Image (cartoon, grey):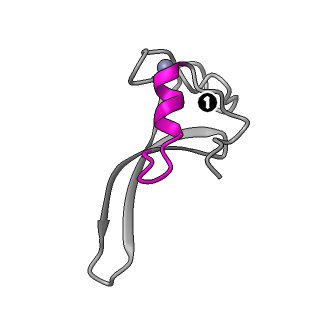
Amino acid sequence: MSEPEKSFEPCCKDMTTAMSFPAGRHFFVENGVLMLTVARSILKDGSEGILEHPVRFCPFCGKPVQDRSESAGPWGHQ
Ligand SMILES: [Zn+2]
């Protein structure tokens, strides 16, 4: 449960640590893409709204983290 998805290998120790937080984790992998939870709040209807954003560069060491995705060009358009 605390193991990050195998398809993604953290590029540095800080990222490994960030992804291993047992609760309130901000980094997670979805479809092989590293995602960052930017904001999280309870909506009016009581459900939880989460704003997530794909991470392109590691915020800790600055390395590109999406090099495994083949669908998008190297620095292609969104
Ligand atoms: Zn890193």
**Residue 28 in the image: x percent, y percent?**
54, 44
| Residue for point 41% across, 53% down | 24
Note whether 55 is above or below 41 in the view shown.
above
The residue lying at 52 percent from left, 38 percent from top is: 19
Label 1 within 8 A of ligand 1 by Cβ = no
Q: Position of residue 59 (x, y in %)?
A: 39, 24
- 67 is higher (above) or lower (below) than 39: above
Q: Which quadrant of the view contains residue 34?
A: top right
Q: Is residue 31 magenta?
A: no
The verdict on residue 17 being magenta is yes
Q: Nearer the viewer, residue 75 or 58?
A: 58
Residue at 58% x, 19% y: name it.
74
In magenta, the rendered stretch is 12-26
Q: Amino acid at mark 1?
A: Ala
Give the residue furthest to the bottom. Answer: 45
Q: Residues within 10 Å of mark 1 (few under 14, many from 20)?
A: few
On the rendered structure, is 17 left or right of 71? left
Residue shown at 38% from the left, 71% from the top = 48
